[in-house]
Amino acid sequence: MLEIEIDGKQLAVEDGSTVMDAATQAGVYIPHFCYHKKLSIAASCRMCLVQVEKAPKPLPACATPVTAGMKVWTRSEAAIKAQKGVMEFLLINHPLDCPICDQGGECQLQDIAVGYGGVTSRYQEEKRVVFNKNLGPLVSTDMTRCINCTRCVRFTTEIAGEMELGQAFRGEHAEIMPFIEKTVDSELSGNIIDLCPVGALTSKPFRFSARTWEMSRRRAVSPHDSLGANLIVQTKHDVVMRVLPYENEELNECWLSDKDRFSYEGLNSDERLTTPQIKQGGEWKAVDWQTALEFVANGLAGVARDHGGEAIGALASPHATVEELFLLQKLTRGLGSGNVDFRLRQSDFRADAARAGAPWLGMKVAEVGELNRLLVIGSFLRKDNPLLAQRVRQAARRGLHVSVVGPTADDWLLPVRQRALVAPSAMVDSLGQIVVALAAEKGAEVDALLRDRLPAQAGDEARAIAASLASGRKVAVWLSNLAVQDRRAAELQQLANEIARLCGGRAGVIGEAANSVGGYLAAALPSAGGLDARGMLEQARKAYVVLGAEPDLDFANPALTRAALGTAQLVVALSAFDAESLREVADVMLPVAPFAETSGTFVNCEGRAQSFVAVARPQGDTRPAWKVLRVLGNLLALPGFDYQDSEAVRDEALAGDIATRLDNRVGEIAPFAVVPATCERVTDVPIHFADPLVRRAPALARSRDAAAPVARASAATLAALGVEAGARVRLAQEGGRVDLAIVADDGVAAGCVRVPAAHPATAGLGAMSGAISVERI
Amino acid sequence: MLSQESLQQIDREVAKYPPEQKQSAVMAALRIAQVEKGWLANETIEFVANYLGMPPIAAYEVASFYNMYDLQPVGRHKITVCTNLPCALSGGVHAAEYLKEKLGIDFNETTPDGLFTLKEGECMGACGDAPVLLHNNHRMCSWMTKERIDQLLAELGGK
Amino acid sequence: MILAGCDGDRSWRLQDYLARGGYAALKKIVAEKIPQETIIAELKTSVLRGRGGAGFPTGLKWSFMPRSFPGDKYLACNSDEGEPGTFKDRDILRYNPHSVIEGMAIAAYAMGAARGYNYIHGEIFEIYQRFEEALEEARAAQLIGQNILGSDFSFELFAHHGYGAYICGEETALLESIEGKKGQPRFKPPFPASYGLYGKPTTINNTETFASVPFIMNMGGEGFLNLGKPNNGGMKLFSVSGHVNRPGNYEVPMGTPFAELLEMAGGMRGGRKLKAVIPGGSSAPVVPAGIMMDCTMDYDSISKAGSMLGSGAVIVMDETTCMVKALERLSYFYFEESCGQCTPCREGTGWLYRVVHRIEHGLGRPDDLDLLNSVTANIMGRTICALGDAASMPVQSFVKHFGDEFMYHIENKKCLVPPEVQYAGSQIYVSPSC
Ligand SMILES: Cc1cc2nc3c(=O)[nH]c(=O)nc-3n(C[C@H](O)[C@H](O)[C@H](O)COP(=O)(O)O)c2cc1C
Ligand code: SF4
Ligand code: FES
């Protein structure tokens, strides 16, 4: 610690701090533009100049290290003079267009200029004009306003991991730009809007729609991935106008993924379902809530009466809230059915009987930065969980070694030290080899449950991964979406646990959705003897309740789902959207509130329960789903449906200490008969199609990440299949076929074809994992 | 995209730097590419960036920062005259004026036959030899009296 | 010294350098395993001050390199000579490149650096090619490379060619440029001695500084110091340009009277009257004739006259020079060459140029001189690198010493120097000796 003085205040700061750090600690504000606590130090705007004892010149606070006994004045005559001088320079070429600038009211330049700018400009020469750039559908530019602080450039390079912006030319001609004709395609691109201290980079979807002071702002939690990013939602007349990050150092820091930030546009989609509807004689008819609810209650009661409660199945989205999931399972069980599930894209449920608790990340999100070894299994990390990927990227800069097992080698924009690029069906073997190598390395015994199932020998890749993990101080082993959705997910979990145990690390599951942990805690799971998500569809039920999901896009096997729902006697859909695939199979559609229009709770991957309130009034006749389910419970005269508010539901659902209910361990797993396939499907869920809300956000739909799907296979696999790169092919699986273009991608494991799910173009296919055939057309 | 010979030259430059610092060779690689292509089109810059495993915009930053790269097509002969003060004191500006008159173009223009482009240069570190000019970046011509300018242009195929 | 006995065609060859006694110092050091401290101490005794402009004592700079740093340390030679008026490094590389190579090898030995780069100014491609050839010769003779002269001392040396950016002469911009980036200076601290090329400890010296090292090793620090005057050791190359009869490089002892140097350069062209001199490269403050004629050419004397010895570029201007026009050209240079990174320089250099340009074109305003002084005050000392100061000092000194001429322009919308006289000294002029 060093003793120093700032503006007469004595304080002790850590060695290696800068004057800016010290000032922050002392609660002293020093004006600045280029400095940002999450970015490298540029020290180029010179706004933070301060006076330092014995220094002949003013020094930039952001870059000047403190020394023992240093005396700093941030508001002395010399300091103010320097700051005003810089302010004048910043303004000489800055347009005076605040009245028409979207940044107006939240502009650092404007704010600081009020304090430091002169009254009139001494600069009488012509001002610089800079041409605007096309950065894509999300970020709008007014480059003449740019003050060259390079925050956006440093963000793309350092945080997003790929230099998509640069400062070209030099001197007064310096311009921030992407490489000619390129856009900024990072899944984190929207953060440059927040970082830009002036109005040079603003939100394209939001552009000119409201002024900051006209909007009310409330906190919320992102309903998308499992990180649980904290949001500020801004509304005007009950319409969500904009979403910004609410800084939470332990989760999203000051960032948001583009999905978190721009999905709100889907709230105003034309496809919103705003009135209850009943299908009569093949025709949809809008009805009032009373009619609809009675129809549903009578229908469900009738099926239970005629066919027994187990003829009813309830399928809910993992993006539903704890309250919704809890009431749905309570309702289902009340009707005498144990068939409830929220894990719609999973296909292996063998672990259910042997689980010690809810699968979770196994650590706090904030602890990711401390890891020094990490094995990620079956992941599209950047797209599965962009901000977690960002944390891993930062940790990798500080020395974290990342190893990967899985069927794809997408660029995560971070160094991957070891990679086993294997088909999904070979992941179990691959992990088994790592267990073998690790046990040998550590001279340890393998868990008795696994001993007989392991491969005899470990290959080079497995040994390299094992060696990396064995040398770790803080190790984690994560299963990501593709692993969790795999046909042998249970064994993958078991093996991941064993790897973690052998190297003294922690096993974790990243989790697909905002409430992947919460669903377990809310008991939205099959009862003993009940059917899981797959069982309910394979053994078709007479009646289904579907909450927040679309049959063709949100399930592990769209063909199977459509078939099962299509033949049911009654399908009740609770949905915010009037989706075509729901119209086809449902008998009644109830408009329930999406994100922002309901209160609720999500439990994120680290087991943190985050509750939120509604920030906007539900559109049309939409009602919060928890209220709809409560009324249904009442109509069906089920006990325990007298909640006053959603908090009461939550308190019952999450009673007790959550931490004690999180546990990744699994016991014995029944063996799985592997049917060899000549060609295996590898399935990703494209980031901007993952859930019903985001896939209706128009700006995101124009992003690079929302490009039309193509099939991908390595050049060698293409040759073996006898198809040419770029050709159109017919992909067929049990249950369906689609035609798609196929491209060469050596980042796909041999013998595999990568075909995205969750997209209308591939919804005609079957299971997300397993055999697929490819034929030239 | 680039000839085998250029690629070999680039490889030689890459070898000057530690293996994980290929980007260090970008200035040389752009120079070599420009010599082959005459100027640096975006595709050329992107090719060089990919060849060295660096982001294209980082290569573009370099190409647009240093004066001697041409991001626009230039004539077969680019003539850059130093007009900085020390040269100006010994006729640098006059030499430039003479060239403008002879070629019938201003700075940053190219003759209609595509033969000559004239540029104004900054100090070339040869002030004692003023007036000085550069021919196609790599050949320095000193003491450029009117007669010597006439000679040079004749040699290069002008009037 | 460095250029003594060197001429056009052959002096740059290894054979010739060896014949002049070249590489004797390196051979001796390697053969006798002379301790690193001894070499640095010798340099300190010589009071060799950096020839790149700042005049920092070289021995002291070398002693900053961390001794026990594990891993690579680097050396960089600054041959980016772009300071208007300076053209000495080009001649050193052209006529005596091996003196630089030897100097760098000795430096590498003294500081434990394993690799070095010579950053060569973009516009002198032919010199870069020649230097590459000289490197080949030295490598073939085992004077650089692995196990130099059969010892366990290794030093790899390469040439890096610039491509037209004055700012790369600034040492940290130079490092960025070697790293394959834009030449934008880094904020210091950390200094290159702790965080330099690729983040490793690095020492940067000017070409002439390195070239002086073998001579110091041969004649001893004391001997070198005595060539010049106390605190200003050795000989120095002065690049004399402008209105003199024989522009060129003159290597003279430190402390030589300016008048003598002017005489060596053939005196004033056409017998015209000296008006002003910029004694240390375009960034140095201009000095009116009267004051200059009393100076000796060394750091201390020039500094007393209110200017800097800088890189030793002496720009001589006679009475036919319009000072407004001269400053306009210099201001344009700094405006064009600002790297664009920090606000005061990026915005301020353009402002300065535009105001001077306006004055020169008869659009000046009465308060423009105050404005220039105030804008320069806002730039100076507030930028990342010294280019901000370099752009400001000419403006301040021109306005200070030749304010009347500026006011005349503003009031009369024309030059104080009568048009018929103007440029008389600046016609295309080729020294008879060339
Ligand atoms: C804008 C600017 C330009 C410079 N140009 C040069 C140059 O062309 N050559 C040079 O040797 N030093 C130049 N310098 C000085 C270098 O930064 C550095 O001080 C020098 O190379 C150190 O070598 P020395 O100690 O041997 O003088 C420049 C400095 C600045 C701020
Ligand atoms: S002073 Fe000028 S040249 Fe130096 S870093 Fe700042 S902007 Fe760049
Ligand atoms: S905030 Fe310190 S220089 Fe920009």
Image (spheres, coloured by chain):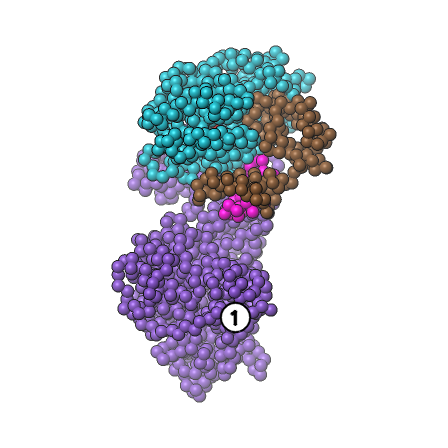
Chain colours: A purple, B brown, C cyan
State whether residue A632 is above or below residue A418. Answer: below
Report the residue at 33% width, 25% height from top. Answer: C32
Residue range in magenta is B43-70
How many marks on residues? 1
Position of A99 with respect to A39 (left or right) is right
Residue A604: name its quadrant. bottom left
For this rendering, which residue is in front, A109 or C128? C128
Report the residue at 49% width, 37% height from top. Answer: C177
Q: Secondary structure at mark 1?
A: strand
Report whether the residue tagged 1 is closer than 8 Å to ligand 3: no
- Could you tell me which chain the residue with mark 1 belongs to? A
* Residue A499 drawn at (x, y percent): 32, 61
Give the prevailing secondary structure in the magenta stretch: helix
For this rendering, which residue is in front, A296 or B62? B62
* Residue C311 drawn at (x, y percent): 49, 23
State whether residue A404 is above or below residue A650. Answer: above
The answer, for residue A177, to whether it is visible in the render is no
Report the residue at 70% width, 28% height from top. Answer: B154
The answer, for residue A372, to whether it is visible in the render is yes
**Which part of the image, by quadrant, shows the C terminus of chain C?**
top right
Q: Which residue is mark 1?
A: A773
Report the residue at 65% width, 20% height from top. Answer: C427
Residue C320: name its quadrant. top right
Q: Amino acid at mark 1?
A: Ser
